[in-house]
Image: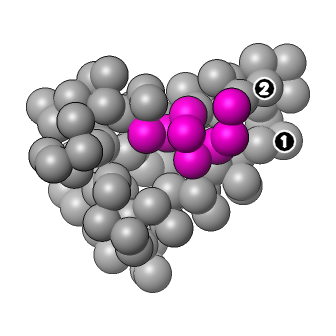
Amino acid sequence: MSVDDAILALAAERGVASSISPEDAARAVDSENWRKRMGEVRDAAVRLAKAGRIVILRKGKPVDPENFKGVIRLRIVDGEV
């Protein structure tokens, strides 16, 4: 499973009322070495957010995928469910 697929599948499973952590996606792709995949997950999240497929959240609020820092969560966009 690709990182993009993992993010989309897990976020769709949670629905628009909830979100996933990047760690959830990394663990779905590689349960043993998930920490090494976190940069890849973050890059995929930015790519998917720019494409309008997910929203990146910080402290529960959407952030600009071009400019954010810190702990994030990922939520599917309403039309993607």
Task: Report which quarter residue 23 is drawn in.
Answer: top right
- Tell me if 40 is positioned left or right of 66 in this view: right
Residue 7 belongs to magenta span: yes
- Tell me if 42 is positioned left or right of 31 in this view: left
Identified by mark 2, the residue type is Asp
Residue bearing mark 2:
30
Q: Residue at x 44, y 80 (%)?
A: 67
State yes or no: discs 1 and 2 in contact (Cβ < 8 Å).
yes
Range of magenta residues: 1-8
Disc count in the image?
Answer: 2
Q: Residue at x 32, y 22 (%)?
A: 13
- Tell me if 36 is positioned left or right of 29 in this view: right
| Quadrant occupied by the C terminus | top left
Q: Residue at x 38, y 70 (%)?
A: 51
Please tell me which residue lies in front, 52 or 20.
52
Q: Position of residue 12 (x, y in %)?
A: 31, 31
Which circle marks residue 76 in the picture?
Answer: none
Would you say the magenta stretch is mainly helix, strand or loop? helix
Residue 70 belongs to magenta span: no
Identified by mark 1, the residue type is Lys
Task: Decide: is 19 above or below 74.
Answer: above
Q: Is residue 52 visible?
A: yes
Q: CA distance from mark 1 to mark 2?
A: 9 Å
Which circle marks residue 36 in the picture?
Answer: 1
Between disc 1 and disc 2, the foreground one is 2
Secondary element at image label 2: loop
